[in-house]
Image (cartoon, rainbow, N blue to C red):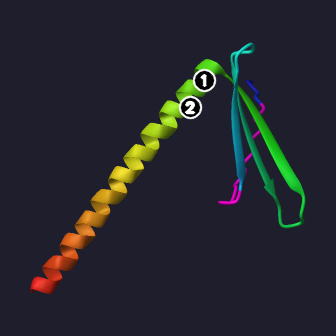
Amino acid sequence: MKSSKKVAHDITFSEGVDLSTYVSDWKENVNIELREEDELGVTNTYDIWLPLAIGRKLVESLANDIIKYDEKMAEKAAEEAAEAAAAIED
């Protein structure tokens, strides 16, 4: 029998999350710090340290995903505008 253990942390932030990043020259790491106060007034801080190579992959992946999302939303808006214009013409 094979057994494994998985630990998952699902964290959802609001638009009010404070974000800071730092690239360490001597450690060659990227630090991402997320800080937000919860509904009880407790400030939660999450420090994520990544190797520089992984930080680069993260930035590239996020940028590509956001670009694709923006393109999809622009196409959807153009389609809706064309449909609205066609409905006016009829």
Quadrant housing residue 57: top right
Q: CB atoms at circles 2 and 1 under 8 Å apart?
A: yes
- The x, y position of residue 70, in whole percent, is 39, 52
Against 8, residue 43 (above or below) is below
SS class, disc 1: helix
Check residue 82 for magenta coloring: no
Left or right of 49 in this view: 74 = left
According to the image, label 1 marks what residue?
54
Q: Residues within 10 Å of mark 2 (few under 14, many from 20)?
A: few
Q: Which residues are magenta?
A: 5-16
The numbered disc on residue 58 is: 2
**Residue type indicated by callout 1:** Ile
The numbered disc on residue 82 is: none
Against 82, residue 37 (above or below) is above
Residue at 70% x, 59% y: name it. Answer: 16
Q: Residues within 10 Å of mark 1 (few under 14, many from 20)?
A: few
Left or right of 26 in this view: 65 = left
